[in-house]
Image (cartoon, rainbow, N blue to C red):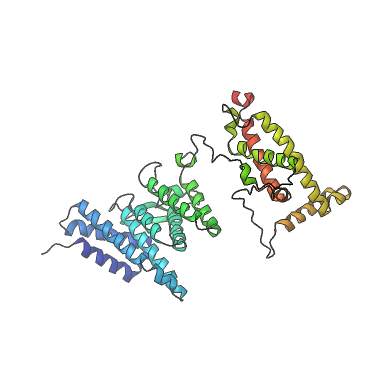
C-alpha cells in the first residue's frame, strides 16, 4: 500500500473544514488539524522537518492565493463580497495559528505570514487583519480537553498572554517580528494622511499592552533630542525696506526661543549660541507681548468689560462657551489644530500672535522646557 503525502492529507483537511464549517469553532478546527498531523506522522515517509516545511509552504501559498482576490472583492458592488473576503482571510490566519499552536510550524510562523500579508494589502485590509491580531491576542487557551483546546477571552489589558502572543519574550523570536511588523505599518500610515490617525493610535495602544513599559524599543535610552531648530536666515526673512528695527529685533528674539525649546542641553554646551541669561531675557521680552495679545483678544470679545461684573460661575460658563465657539467647525465637529512646522515669515508673526492656539503652543513649549530644567537643580539632583 502506497504511503500518503502531506499534500493529500492537507487537501482532505481543507475539504473537511469547509464541509463542516469548522473555521467558526476553535475546538473543531484544532481537532481536525490534530488528526491531520497524526495522519501525516503515521502515513507518510517524510521526516518531521520536511513535514514542517511542507505545512508552512502549503498554508502560506493558500493565504496569498486568497489575498490576490482583494482587488476584485473590494471593487465589487456587492458589499457581501468584501465581507466574505475578509472573513475567509481571517479563517486562513486562524488555520496558520492552530498549526503553530500544535507545534507543526515554527513558533514565529504565524507572525511571519501576517507580516508578509500586511505588506501586500491596502490600508482598509490591514485594519481588518489588525482586528484579527487584537482578537487573537485576547483569546486565551486555558486547558486541553481530550484532543481539543478550550479557549476563553482574556481581559483587554492582558493581551500579552493571548493565543497569538503566548510566550512572547521581548527582544526574542516572534516578539521582534511583531515589533518590526507593526512599526513598518505605522511608518506606512504616517504617509497616508490624517484619516489613519485612529488606526495608528490602536496600534500604539496594542504595543503598549503587549510589551512592558521598559521595552527598549519604546524608551529613549540615550535621552536624545529631536532635530535642532535652525534660525531663519536674514535672506529668508523677507524684510521690507520700511521694516521697523524693533519689530526685526523682536522677530529674532521670538524665534530664537525655539533653539532651547528643541534642545534644552544647549545651555550646557561650550560656545553655546544661547546662554541661559539670554534665554531669560528673551522670555522676559516675549511674555509681555503674548499677554498683551491675550488682553486685546478678550477686549474684542467683550470679556474685559464684563468679567468684573460677572459671578465666578457665570464667567466660567461664558469662557467655556467662548472656547466652544472658537474651536467648533460649522458642521458642529471640533476643529483640529496641528502645527507640523511653524511659518516664520516676519509678515506673519503679528497674525500668529493674534491666534489663541499659537500663543498656547508657545506657552506650552515654555512650560515643558522649564519643567525639564527644574529637574537639573541641586535639590533635584540630590534626590
- The residue depicted at 35 percent of the width and 69 percent of the height is 21
Q: Quadrant of residue 115?
A: bottom left
Establish if 171 lies above or below 119. above
Q: Relative to residue 306, is residue 96 drawn left or right? A: left
Judging depth in this view, the residue of 146 and 85 nearest the camera is: 85
Q: Which residue lies most toward the right here?
A: 309
Question: Which image quarter holds the N terminus?
Answer: bottom left
Q: Quadrant of residue 148?
A: bottom left
Establish if 306 lies above or below 65. above
Judging depth in this view, the residue of 153 and 311 nearest the camera is: 311
Q: Which residue lies most toward the front here?
A: 241
Q: Relative to residue 319, is residue 333 drawn left or right? A: left
- Mark yes or no: residue 74 visible: yes
- Mark yes or no: residue 310 visible: no
- The residue depicted at 70 percent of the width and 32 percent of the height is 280
- The residue depicted at 64 percent of the width and 31 percent of the height is 374
Whole-percent x, y for residue 195 in the image:
54, 60
Establish if 166 lies above or below 57. above
Judging depth in this view, the residue of 144 and 187 nearest the camera is: 187
Q: Relative to residue 262, is residue 309 drawn left or right? A: right
Question: Which image quarter holds the C terminus?
Answer: top right
Whole-percent x, y for residue 98 in the image:
33, 57
Q: Relative to residue 111, is residue 304 drawn left or right? A: right
Whole-percent x, y for residue 33 in the image:
29, 60
- The residue depicted at 32 percent of the width and 69 percent of the height is 18
Judging depth in this view, the residue of 309 and 292 nearest the camera is: 292
Whole-percent x, y for residue 224 in the image:
51, 36
Q: Which residue lies most toward the left here?
A: 1
State how many labels appear.
Answer: 0
Amino acid at each position: 500500500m502506497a504511503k500518503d503525502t502531506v499534500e493529500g492529507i492537507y487537501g482532505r483537511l481543507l475539504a473537511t473544514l469547509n464541509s463542516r464549517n469548522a473555521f467558526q469553532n476553535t475546538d473543531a478546527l484544532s481537532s481536525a488539524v490534530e488528526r491531520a498531523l497524526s495522519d501525516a506522522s503515521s502515513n507518510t515517509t517524510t521526516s518531521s522537518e520536511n513535514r514542517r516545511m511542507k505545512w508552512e509552504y502549503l498554508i502560506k501559498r493558500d493565504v496569498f492565493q486568497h489575498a490576490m482576490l482583494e482587488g476584485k472583492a473590494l471593487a465589487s458592488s456587492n458589499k457581501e463580497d468584501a465581507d466574505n473576503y475578509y472573513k475567509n482571510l481571517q479563517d486562513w490566519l486562524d488555520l496558520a495559528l492552530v498549526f503553530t499552536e500544535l507545534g507543526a510550524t515554527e513558533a514565529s510562523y504565524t507572525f511571519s505570514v501576517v507580516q508578509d500579508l500586511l505588506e501586500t494589502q491596502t490600508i482598509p485590509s490591514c485594519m481588518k487583519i489588525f482586528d484579527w491580531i487584537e482578537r487573537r491576542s485576547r483569546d486565551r487557551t486555558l486547558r486541553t480537553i481530550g484532543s481539543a483546546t478550550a479557549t476563553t477571552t482574556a481581559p483587554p489589558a492582558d493581551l500579552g498572554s493571548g493565543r497569538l502572543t503566548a510566550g512572547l519574550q521581548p527582544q526574542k523570536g516572534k516578539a521582534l517580528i511583531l515589533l518590526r511588523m507593526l512599526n513598518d505599518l505605522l511608518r506606512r500610515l504616517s504617509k497616508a494622511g490624517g484619516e489613519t490617525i485612529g488606526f495608528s493610535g490602536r496600534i500604539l495602544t496594542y504595543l503598549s499592552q503587549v510589551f512592558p513599559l521598559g521595552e527598549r524599543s519604546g524608551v529613549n535610552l540615550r535621552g536624545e533630542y529631536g532635530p535642532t531648530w535652525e534660525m531663519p536666515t536674514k535672506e529668508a526673512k523677507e524684510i521690507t525696506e520700511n521694516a521697523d528695527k524693533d519689530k526685526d529685533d523682536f522677530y529674532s528674539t521670538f524665534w530664537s526661543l525655539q533653539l532651547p525649546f528643541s534642545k534644552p542641553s544647549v545651555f550646557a554646551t561650550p560656545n553655546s549660541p544661547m546662554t541661559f541669561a539670554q534665554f531669560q531675557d528673551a522670555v522676559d521680552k516675549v511674555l509681555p507681548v503674548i499677554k498683551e495679545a491675550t488682553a486685546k483678544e478678550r477686549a474684542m470679545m467683550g470679556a474685559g468689560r464684563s468679567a468684573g461684573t460677572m459671578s465666578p460661575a457665570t464667567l466660567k460658563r461664558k469662557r467655556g462657551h467662548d472656547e466652544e465657539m472658537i474651536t467648533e467647525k460649522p458642521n458642529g465637529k471640533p476643529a483640529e489644530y496641528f502645527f507640523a512646522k511653524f511659518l516664520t515669515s516676519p509678515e506673519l508673526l503679528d497674525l500668529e500672535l493674534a491666534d489663541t492656539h499659537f500663543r498656547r503652543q508657545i506657552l506650552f513649549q515654555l512650560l515643558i522646557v522649564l519643567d525639564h530644567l527644574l529637574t537639573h537643580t541641586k535639590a533635584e539632583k540630590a534626590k
